[in-house]
Image (cartoon, rainbow, N blue to C red):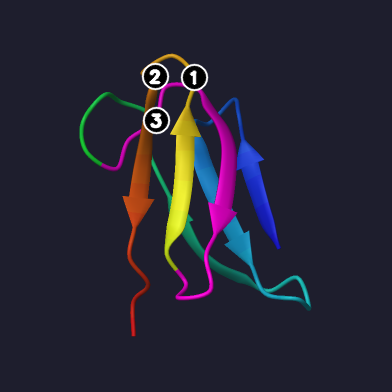
Amino acid sequence: MRYIDRCGSRILVFDKDGTFLFKLGPEGTGDGQFTDPEYLDVDSDGNVFVSDRKQKNIEVFNPVI
């Protein structure tokens, strides 16, 4: 399960049982930071894609193994 915390400008990721796994963010304009995260998706390899509406970009996060 994924949740976009629009007020905190971060992405919270939980497992299927609701256990917190990790977060992506915080607020900012650097790599791995968000000002207005809007959409996210995960591909079959576990890469996480997050679009940021204000920065007009897509951040890609590789899975940690």
Q: Amino acid at mark 1?
A: Arg
Q: Amino acid at mark 2?
A: Lys
Q: Which quarter of the figure is the C terminus placed in?
A: bottom left
Where is mark 3, residue-wise? 34
**Neighbour tally class for label 3: few under 14, some 14-19, many 20 plus, Cα within 10 Å:** many
Image vertical order of residue 60 relative to residue 36, above or below = below
Q: Is 43 colored magenta in this rendering?
A: yes
Q: Is residue 43 left or right of residue 5?
A: left
Label 1 sits on a secondary structure element that is loop
User: Can you tell which quarter of the image residue 40 is in?
Assistant: top right
Point out residue 26 in the picture as x, y percentages from the top left corner: 38, 38
Label 2 sits on a secondary structure element that is loop
Image vertical order of residue 23 relative to residue 46, above or below = above
Evaluate if marks 1 and 2 touch, with contact meaning CB atoms under 8 Å apart. Answer: yes
Point out residue 35 in the picture as x, y percentages from the top left corner: 42, 22
Residue drawn at point x = 59 percent, y = 61 percent: 13
Where is mark 1, residue-wise? 53
The magenta stretch spans which residues?
32-46
Sequence-wise, which precedes: disc 2 or disc 3?
3
Sequence-wise, which precedes: disc 3 or disc 1?
3
Point out residue 51 in the picture as x, y percentages from the top left corner: 47, 34
Residue drawn at point x = 37 percent, y = 72 percent: 63
Evaluate if marks 3 and 1 touch, with contact meaning CB atoms under 8 Å apart. Answer: no
Q: Is residue 43 left or right of residue 34?
A: right
Where is mark 2, residue-wise? 56
**Mark 3 and mark 1: Cα distance apart in space:** 9 Å
